[in-house]
């Protein structure tokens, strides 16, 4: 049985994209990445065609498929419950969680920032495995009740599987390999001991990478020995964990480089702007294609009207570009497309990913006046230069 991977992460490269909203629970939005549907199909097929027929022979084929579907639904519930505990503990300590996303390797609670203290990190991390252990115990007790009441073997089988699954999920996530929950607990302990989050993250991420490589080697050996499906999954999980461990450390490096740096020190103070009377055709030819910007501030006689993006242009039929103007499609200044000059630059990585935002560029505005524009390119160039001149000590 291949356990789903659960964990918590700040917004960044490892965050799954292209998600669909499922529902809200306790104020958290639960989203589904299409890759999770592949996981659900594989789980259903594995249970219906392999595990349940082997453990409970002589049942009708349709019964096995119903067992597989219920088992997959139980896994979804278990992952959401696991991640929900992370989210509730995070909120208890004032950390904002963007939502819970289900994807092919399980799920993650998306944090906007790292915990401020080792204690918070540890409590958040340990909550997930404890929740899975709780579910394992509950499913086991319900299984015992089902057996005592002589309920159909199909029901007992699914309950047994879900109890075992949650036990495996808890144990797997307790492995001290970052970014698994156990790895975050390890990082919290190192952070408390050394007093240095960056150093603690480096050590924990290296251990996580080593564990991921071991998983990949184990998977390759299993594949060679004929366990094709299991081997493939271990290799994929290992590759994902290694990528997540490395990117988590890189994200922290970026945040440390930007720490205490206000937006006004990194913004471009002479941004290219466009007037609201400009046609979309001219906007493309004279501005977008020339300067390669996907967002441009709209300014008339020194007054900021808002901004226009490539996404806005695409909403207008091509044949109307010669007559439609920027005024027809611009977005007024809002929290989604502006930032204060005194805002910490380290927060921009999360701000630039906000729904309804302008992507990799934001207008820097003070009391309705445009001061400049800041982009991911500005941040990247600064971070690259800082890390080159002041590399972190290992």
Image (spheres, rainbow, N blue to C red):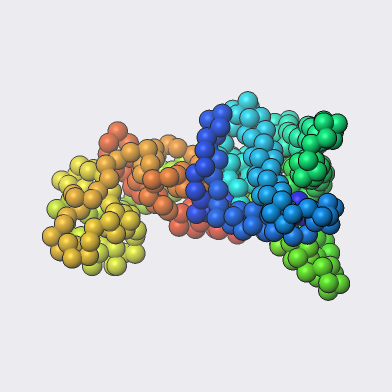
Q: Position of residue 242 (x, y in %)?
A: 71, 58
Closer to the camera in the image, 353 or 195: 353
Dividing the picture into quadrants, the one containing residue 356 is top left
Dividing the picture into quadrants, the one containing residue 104 is bottom right
| Residue occupying image coordinates x 22% and y 65% | 318
Identify whether 199 is placed above or below 42. above
Query: How many numbered callouts?
Result: 0
Q: Position of residue 288 (x, y in %)?
A: 29, 63
Q: Position of residue 276 (x, y in %)?
A: 18, 50
33 relative to 40 in the view: left or right: left
Dividing the picture into quadrants, the one containing residue 166 is top right
383 relative to 270 in the view: left or right: right
| Residue occupying image coordinates x 29% and y 67% | 289
Q: Quadrant of the N terminus?
A: bottom right
| Residue occupying image coordinates x 47% and y 48% | 353
Closer to the camera in the image, 141 or 79: 141
Q: Position of residue 133 (x, y in %)?
A: 80, 36
């Amino acid at each position: 049985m291949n356990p789903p991977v659960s964990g918590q992460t700040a917004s960044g490269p490892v965050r799954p994209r292209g998600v669909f909203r499922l529902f809200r629970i306790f104020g958290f939005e639960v989203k589904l990445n299409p890759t999770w549907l592949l996981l659900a199909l594989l789980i259903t097929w594995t249970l219906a065609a392999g595990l349940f027929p082997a453990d409970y022979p002589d049942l009708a084929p349709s019964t096995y498929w119903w067992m597989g579907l219920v088992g997959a639904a139980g896994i979804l519930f278990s992952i959401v419950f696991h991640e929900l505990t992370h989210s509730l503990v995070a909120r208890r300590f004032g950390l904002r969680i963007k939502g819970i996303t289900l994807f092919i390797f399980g799920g993650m609670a998306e944090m906007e920032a790292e915990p401020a203290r080792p204690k918070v990190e540890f409590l958040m991390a340990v909550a997930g495995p404890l929740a899975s252990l709780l579910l394992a115990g509950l499913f086991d007790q319900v299984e015992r009740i089902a057996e005592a009441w002589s309920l159909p073997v199909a029901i007992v089988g699914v309950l047994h599987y879900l109890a075992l699954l949650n036990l495996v999920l808890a144990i797997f996530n307790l492995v001290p390999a970052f970014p698994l929950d156990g790895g975050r607990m390890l990082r919290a302990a190192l952070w408390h001991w050394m007093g240095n989050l960056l150093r603690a993250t480096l050590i924990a991420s290296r251990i996580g990478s080593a564990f991921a490589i071991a998983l990949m080697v184990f998977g390759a050996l299993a594949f060679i020995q004929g366990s094709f499906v299991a081997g493939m999954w271990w290799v994929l999980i290992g590759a994902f964990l290694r990528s997540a461990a490395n990117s988590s450390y890189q994200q922290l490096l970026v945040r440390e480089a930007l720490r205490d740096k206000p937006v006004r020190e990194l913004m471009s103070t002479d941004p290219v702007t466009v007037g609201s009377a400009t046609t979309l055709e001219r906007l493309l030819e004279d501005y977008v294609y020339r300067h390669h910007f996907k967002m441009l501030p709209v300014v008339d006689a020194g007054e900021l009207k808002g901004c226009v993006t490539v996404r806005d242009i695409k909403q207008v039929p091509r044949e109307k570009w010669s007559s439609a103007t920027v005024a027809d499609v611009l977005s007024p200044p809002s929290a989604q497309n502006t930032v204060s000059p005194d805002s910490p630059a380290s927060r921009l990585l999360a701000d630039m990913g906000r729904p309804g935002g302008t992507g990799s560029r934001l207008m820097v505005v003070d009391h309705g006046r445009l001061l400049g524009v800041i982009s991911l390119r500005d941040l990247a160039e600064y971070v690259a230069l800082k890390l080159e001149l002041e590399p972190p000590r290992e």
